[in-house]
Amino acid sequence: MATAPHPSPVRTLLKREESYAIHALLYVHEYPGASAAQIAADLQLPAAFTAKVLRRLAEAGYVESRKGRSGGVRLARALAELTLLDVIETMSGAVIIDTCQTRGRCATQVRTGSCSLNTIWFALSLQFREALAAVRLDALANDPHEVLPA
C-alpha cells in the first residue's frame, strides 16, 4: 500500500501582525466604530494580539480608538492614503529579502570580494517594495456598513 506524499510546510511572507493590521484596517473601513473585541471575533483573530495591532495602528495615526457608548475604532486616515507597503513597514520595519542587505558587505563579499546573490536580493527587494507600494488599501476595501448601536 503506497503512502500519500507528506505535504510541504507553508511559510508566509507576511508576519501575523502585518496581515492582521491590513485586515483590521479594511474591517474598520467597513464597520467604523466597531470594538476591538468585535474586530477580533469577526476576523477570527486572537483578541489580545488584535488589541496590540490596533494600538500600533493608532500610534501610527491610521486609526483612533474611543471608549464608551459612542466609541470604538475608526479610521484616522483615508484608505486611499495607505498602501500595503505603508502598513507592513509600520508594523515591522523596512521590507528586504535577505539580512545580508543590512550589511555593508555580506559574508560572501568579505570572503570572495563580490556576491552576485546580494545583487539579486537588492533587485528583488526593490521590485517587491514597488509592488506593495502600488496597492492602495481603498482598492481592496468593501463598501462601508452602518454599525448599529448594541
Image (cartoon, rainbow, N blue to C red):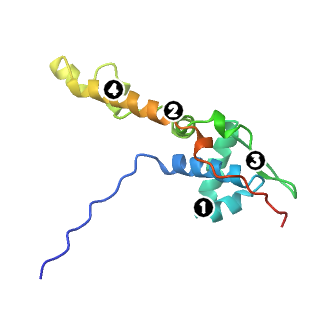
Q: Label 2: which residue?
A: 133
**Residue located at (40% from left, 46% from top):** 13
Tell me which label, 2 or 3, sits earlier in the chain.
3
Horizontally, residue 86 falls left or right of residue 147, namely left
Residue 76 coordinates in the image, percent (x, y)? 74, 39
Comparing 111 with 124, the one in front is: 124
Q: Secondary structure at mark 4?
A: helix
**Residue located at (78% from left, 54% from top):** 33
Tell me which label, 1 or 4, sits earlier in the chain.
1
Q: Secondary structure at mark 3?
A: strand
Q: Label 3: which residue?
A: 74
Comparing 19 with 106, the one in front is: 19
Q: Label 1: which residue?
A: 43
Quadrant of the rendering where the C terminus is positioned: bottom right
Label placed on residue 123: 4
Kind of residue indicated by mark 4: Ala
Kind of residue indicated by mark 3: Arg
Q: How far, Cα to Cα, is label 2 from label 1?
A: 24 Å
Residues packed near mark 2 inside 10 Å, few (<14), some (14 to 19) or many (20 plus): some
Tell me which label, 1 or 3, sits earlier in the chain.
1
